[in-house]
Image (cartoon, helix red, strand yellow):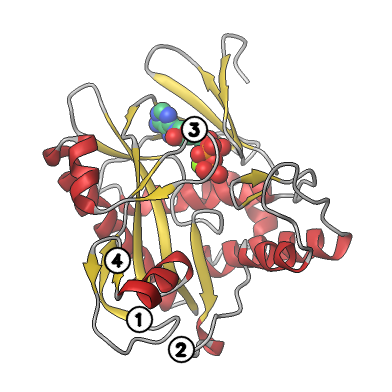
Amino acid sequence: MSETAVHVGSGKVRELYALDEERLLLVASDRISTFDVVLPTPIPDKGRVLTGLSAFWFARTRDLVPNHMLALRDDGRSLECRRLEMLPVEVVVRGYLAGSGWKDYGATGTVCGHRLPDGLRESDRLPEPIVTPATKATTGHDLNIDEEEAARICGEERYLAAREAALGVYRFGEAHAAARGIIVADTKFELGVDADGAIVLADEVITPDSSRFWPADSYEPGRAQPSYDKQFVRDWCETTGWDKTAPGPELPDAIVSGTSARYIEAFEQLTEIPFDEYVSDPRIVIA
Ligand SMILES: Nc1ncnc2c1ncn2[C@@H]1O[C@H](COP(=O)(O)OP(=O)(O)OP(=O)(O)O)[C@@H](O)[C@H]1O
Ligand SMILES: [Mg+2]
């Protein structure tokens, strides 16, 4: 790391350093958070998977939507990026009915203000992807809001540009993944505004942390889907009786190694690059 990097913040997963006025260094740790609580046990190689996958998508969608990536460092977990004014909402795109979307649909027939057709089953593909924004809670859980409120919070023009960018990247990623046996059921984007007022894709993109990935070969609507991503840890946490407030439980070895393997498997399936090749030369994901 450059000697002039100044630590400016810690997210649940990333450490943020300012390189200068315009540039940030985002370093993805191996920390894992579930239900918005960071667990005490790290997942080996997880940070590299997140940074590598994000860089892979940034490189492939830059003609669709401008993004913050400037350079990927040799450690495979550090990304130099443009420093942006982040929008105060997260832009979630859902192509399938799962998680809080399925719960809300069951209760009201709607998801964040979107009325959906009657008779949908859990995990069904939606007729069209929908955008369900959430506020970025500084503590505790993010809160789902409807798109009108997101437009009020961000300014309508900014919000509309952000939702179009998010939908475009989701459609691209969903099609790429589907052709490689992975369903991207939903995913969360964070966007910012650059000095010229343009909307820029930031943070991480279509990773196992920000998305629900389902194996396509065992997909069967009408039930929750098995998944090889963070859901594996969430499901284990659900069996412990943990009340989902800090501190979270220590993960057993089998859950740690199983989770690490799932992150790496998702990376390899989506990028078609062996993970050890990424580790020895990270820039192959953006070549
Ligand atoms: N280009 C950027 N400019 C400014 N801030 C950014 C940029 N890209 C990402 N960020 C911010 O950096 C932080 C990344 O850290 P991290 O992902 O650990 O945070 P988090 O949001 O607390 O965790 P989680 O993803 O689990 O919700 C986020 O606050 C994100 O909004
Ligand atoms: Mg984050």
Rounded to the nearest whole Å, what is the CA distance between mark 4 and mark 3?
A: 29 Å
Q: Position of residue 85 (x, y in %)?
A: 32, 26
Disc nearer the start of the sequence (1/3): 1
Mark 2 residue crowding within 10 angstroms, few (<14) / some (14–19) / many (20+): some
Residue 153 in the image: state x and y as whole percent.
24, 36
Mark toward the start of the polypeptide (1 vs 2)? 1
Disc 1 residue type (three-letter):
Arg
Disc 4 and disc 2 in contact, CB within 8 angstroms: no
On the question of residue 64 being in view, the answer is no
Q: Earlier in the sequence, mark 2 or mark 3?
A: 3
Which residue is denoted by mark 4 in the rendering? 171
Of circles 2 and 3, the one toward us is 3
Indicate which disc, 1 or 4, sits on the residue closer to the N terminus: 1
Residue 197: image quadrant is: top left
**Is the CB of mark 3 within 8 Å of ligand 1?**
no
Kindly identify the amino acid type of the residue bearing the numbered disc 3.
Thr
